[in-house]
Amino acid sequence: MQENNINMSQDFEFEPEVDINETIGQIVNRSRLEKGIKIEKAALETKLKIQYLQAIEKDDFDALPAPIYAKNFIRIYANFLGLDGVGISKKYDSTNIGLAGLPARKKTAFTYYISLFFHFLFRHPFILLGIIVVLIILFFYPGGSDDIEHDELPSFPSTTLQPASLDDYQPVFDLNEPLPKS
């Protein structure tokens, strides 16, 4: 059997090995120095301040504006250096989980949703006008109220009911009255 000899060409660039014990600053600093990039050029290309890049390389994340900015600055800088920006920014999350100081998420108050509803109505006056018209029609429409007398035909009892026996049968008219003359 002939063994396949595969020569790896030098065209492939592999991402440098990242040591688990290395800090984020050590990883990006080592990568920048290996590529021979000056920090001023990195600041120009990434559009981040030099002070922020230096703070990232020194692991001085308190010098960055806020934790969410720090995470995004790290991602941008690592992507510029050819590293996995998302992975390194996740490493920032795992090491600085308690530093964010964000308050616990609270339940949204019901009054917030009411204010959103009224805000929506006042931003769309035609919808508000439509609701008012419908409410006026429902309030003043006489069709559903029993207070107003109508000229209606008298209602007759249903003819589908059958008496149980002839003793229970009661005529509709009085037998002692004479029949109307035609």
Image (spheres, helix red, strand yellow):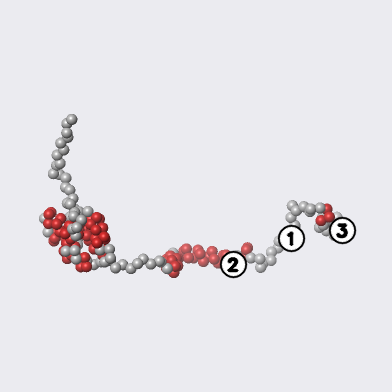
Front one among 178 and 103? 103
Taking the spot 13% from the left edge, 61% from the top edge, the residue there is 40
The answer to whether residue 152 shows anywhere in this view is: yes
| Residue 169 screen position, x and y as percent | 82, 55
Mark number for residue 154? Answer: 1
| N-term mark: 1 or 3 | 1
Type of amino acid at the residue the image marks with label 1: Pro
Taking the spot 47% from the left edge, 63% from the top edge, the residue there is 127
Taking the spot 17% from the left edge, 51% from the top edge, the residue there is 16
| N-term mark: 1 or 2 | 2
SS for callout 2: helix
Q: Residue furthest top?
A: 1
SS for callout 1: loop
Residue that carries the numbered disc 2 in the rendered image? 140
Residue that carries the numbered disc 3 in the rendered image? 175
Name the front one of labels 1 and 3: 3
| Residue 57 screen position, x and y as percent | 17, 62
Q: Residues within 10 Å of mark 1 (few under 14, many from 20)?
A: few
Find residue 108 and report its image quarter.
Answer: bottom left
